[in-house]
Amino acid sequence: MATLPTLPASPDSPRSRSVRSKQTSLTLFPTTACHGGPEIACAASTPAPAPDRSLKPAAELVGIARLAASSPLAEAKRDTEYFLLPVRSIVNHCDSERVPFNWTINPYRGCEFGCKYCYARYTHEYMEIDGGEFEKKIYAKKDAAGLVVRDLANPRLSGEHIAIGTATDPYQPAEREFRVTRSILEQMAQREGLSLSITTKSNQVLSDIDLLRKISERSSIMVNISITTLRTRLARLLEPRAPRPDLRLEAVKRLREAGIAAGVLAMPVLPGITDREADLDALARGARDANAQWFAANVLFLRPSSQKQFLPFLAEKFPRLLRQYEEWYLRRGDSPLTYRKEIAERIHALQKKYGLGRRPESPKPTAYEPPQMSLGLELETGARRGMIEANTELVSGEAR
């Protein structure tokens, strides 16, 4: 596959525009060996480790950090500790300009999947815990069912979309034991007119397919299955404890067979690692074969707390890419606009090629009507239609 020269850090320079005009491929990085192939290490700086703030006395902590410090240890296994976290609410307001919704639910803090690129590591820092502990200290939110009932009664949420699983995966391994996500969905299944979405990397979402069906009868709900690559070894390297990509595609297929709206998110696209044309094409084709309704993607966004974990990983596994990532991400946490636009164009082309839709920004709430009322309305409408047709024939006959 043809590759391109590495772009300068600034996407707006005349040189970058002239290079772009000659490009035939969207892979803006040098050719990188797949995992398992030879790599030549390069010398590059990595961020200094952050001080261990978890040593601060609990009495000096405030807010969510104090709640986390007082959370009882529920279990410990596989080098992971699980805590029960008392919280004041389950539905939380989100004011980020990067997402098309204002309300979110994250049943857990921390995520056991351990994705090397995870942007949400900063959320542990709110609890005065280093982001490197994100997959080792998992906090299950207490009394979620009761809190979500109270939160959903808030008039501010009327007609608003609620996104579940925006910072941590609602179907990570902890869900098998703590069932926080299911307890929330059980309450939502009793309500009507909600607008919901679930985003996950796990086929464990199928364990709640009964609830998803019930919810879809009264509310709008869609499921986003996140898949970065179909290459199993690469996926295991990037997302050590997440289910295999083929299992996630199978989850999409089964959700669609159950009548649940579902699609694939290629998020994030990792420059030089998962952005190859053939790889994205294979992923889009797999989404089509699984009957996904949409296929969408976003390029990697890397916060400082995530950089501390991802850049050392990059230096070890993909050293040729490290310098370019540092030039792009250390200053602004994002890739150049030119690169993002080209990836967007590639994804749009794949959507057209495989007949896949774009990601719905947010489903509109469904107005619920009990079955008997719908039936009565249909009968009444049919009766009226019959009367109108009979009158029309009578008038026509009299005219003749």
Image (tube, grey):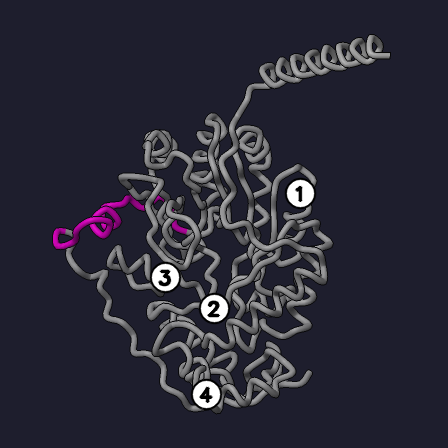
Relative image position of residue 274 (x, y in whole percent):
58, 71
Q: Which amino acid does label 2 sit on?
A: Leu
**Magenta residue span:** 59-76
Image disc number at residue 300: 2
Residue 346 on the magenta segment: no
Sequence-wise first label, 1 or 2: 1
How dense is the environment of label 4, judged by Cα within 10 Å: few (below 14), some, or many (20 and up)? some
Q: What residue type is labelled 3?
A: Arg
Image disc number at residue 121: 3
Residue in view at x 84 percent, y 10 percent: 397
How dense is the environment of label 1, judged by Cα within 10 Å: few (below 14), some, or many (20 and up)? some
Residue in view at x 34 percent, y 78 percent: 331
Sequence-wise first label, 2 or 3: 3
Relative image position of residue 195 (x, y in whole percent):
48, 38
Label 1 – label 4 distance at C-alpha: 43 Å
Q: What residue type is labelled 4?
A: Pro
Residue 170 makes an appearance in the image? yes
User: In the drawing, does residue 17 fall left or right of residue 383?
Assistant: left
Vertical position of residue 275 compared to residue 169: above or below: below
| Nearer to us: label 2 or label 3 | 2
Sequence-wise first label, 1 or 4: 4
Image disc number at residue 256: 1
* Secondary element at tag 3: helix
Label 4 – label 3 distance at C-alpha: 28 Å
Residue in view at x 42 percent, y 49 percent: 101
* Secondary element at tag 1: helix
Q: Which of 126 and 301 is in front in this view?
A: 301
Label 4 – label 2 distance at C-alpha: 18 Å
| Nearer to us: label 1 or label 4 | 4
Would you say the residues marked 4 and 3 are in contact, meaning their CB atoms lie under 8 Å apart? Answer: no
- Could you say which quadrant of the image residue 72 lies in? top left
